[in-house]
Image: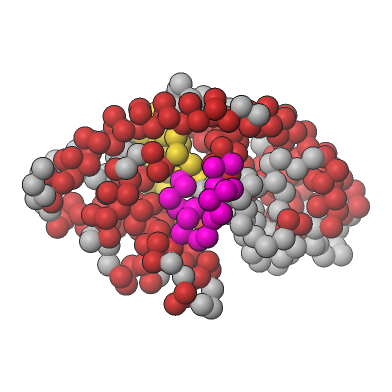
Amino acid sequence: MTEPTFAPRVFSGIKPSGGLTLGNYLGAIKRFVQTQDAGTESIFCVVDLHAITVWQDPAELPGMTREVAAGYLASGIDPERSILFNQSQVAAHAELAWIFNCVARIGWMNRMTQFKDKAGKNAEKASLGLYAYPSLMAADILIYHATHVPVGEDQKQHVELTRDIAAKFNHDYKVDFFPLTEPVIEGPAMRIMNLRDGTKKMSKSGESDMERINMTDDADTIAKKFKKARTDPAPLPETPDELKDRPEAKNLVEIYAALSDSTAERVLAEHAGAGWGQFKPALADLAVDKLAPIADEMKRLMDDPAEIDRILARGAERAREIADPVLARTYEIVGLVR
Ligand code: ATP
Ligand code: MG
């Protein structure tokens, strides 16, 4: 049997689980815009059903959903060229996730490091949804037959699991229905670290605001956070190799490289020998330069929540046009009477 060819299509999502961070911007949104601008058919989602795998205050969730939407729009996602919507408005995601819950194996879920990190020591008390999260993520991707998923490094394992689910579905039902999706993880800042602990990822749901740069932070806050960021006493070295055992230093150099569309090599070629008292203010200026216009636009957009809701509803309508026939065909393959 010949392999079907799937037209290139990109899907990716961000949870409304807090304010957007520099990690979300460099690891995800900035690259989404590049994908869109390169002309690839692109679908971007505010994955609200993923957010509620941990407790979200219903009074705050709509605002966070709109903030993530505003972050996409302010960074350059064009809701005409791309499809932009929130997950819960397209029921097919949750429906396909159920089918995938019956395809994925418990042993696969047990290997997921994000569950271990997020559930912590008290895994028995974590929600069943947090455990099943990767199966919903596979559905998010495969309901659009997406071929490529740009994500940060932390999500690589989940995209690989998506491939396993697609392969097992295709094998069990003797079809070539779902593509084997590729994770796209390239660039200098695919895992931005926490500013206070270079061994942990920067996350929007992290405990302290000082450990992350938010996309909406003002110039003073950004300068203060970089100033207080943990570092070691040594100056900047000449080559990236010498940053191997210096996680905090490596992180700040990589942030600088990503913000300036450069590489760690080039940043070090320019700043080797500099101390932190020199490098940190330069980094803060660069971050403000890149983030301030986006933050201003986000604020402008968030002043008109009805307009954001209209954009999301229209995006959801377009998403359903792709998703619903895929779900219908899936049900048929599985043998569910319609
Ligand atoms: P949470 O703490 O709630 O998990 P998060 O900051 O990890 O929030 P997600 O919504 O889980 O954000 O992830 C959205 C996208 O941002 C994903 O593609 C993810 O890989 C990317 N991303 C998240 N954090 C980072 C980071 N520190 N560096 C690079 N990319 C990141
Ligand atoms: Mg995350």
At 71% from the left edge and 65% from the top edge, which residue is drawn?
197
Residue extent of the magenta highlight: 47-63
- Image quarter (top left, top right, bottom left or bottom right) of the C terminus: top left
Residue 305 falls in image quadrant: top right
**Could you say where residue 85 lies in the image, as x and y percent from the top left?**
44, 34
Pick the front one: 211 or 70: 70
Q: Is residue 30 visible?
A: no
Residue 157 shown left or right of residue 221 in the figure: left
The chosen color scheme is secondary structure
* Residue that sits furthest to the top in the current view: 80
* Residue that sits furthest to the front in the current view: 59
Q: Number of marks in the image?
A: 0
At 80% from the left edge and 45% from the top edge, which residue is drawn?
222
**Could you say where residue 264 lies in the image, as x and y percent from the top left?**
69, 48
**Could you say where residue 132 lies in the image, as x and y percent from the top left?**
37, 62
Residue 48 shown left or right of residue 286 in the figure: left
At 46% from the left edge and 31% from the top edge, which residue is drawn?
312
Residue 318 falls in image quadrant: top left
**Could you say where residue 247 lies in the image, as x and y percent from the top left?**
70, 63
Pick the front one: 314 or 184: 314
Q: In the rendered image of this protein, does residue 208 appear above or below residue 274?
A: below
Q: In the rendered image of this protein, does residue 45 appear above or below residue 248?
A: above
Residue 38 shown left or right of residue 161 in the figure: right
At 64% from the left edge and 47% from the top edge, which residue is drawn?
19
Asked if the stretch drawn in magenta spans residue 48, the answer is yes
Asked if the stretch drawn in magenta spans residue 238, the answer is no
- Image quarter (top left, top right, bottom left or bottom right) of the N terminus: top left
Q: Is residue 305 visible?
A: yes
Pick the front one: 170 or 215: 215
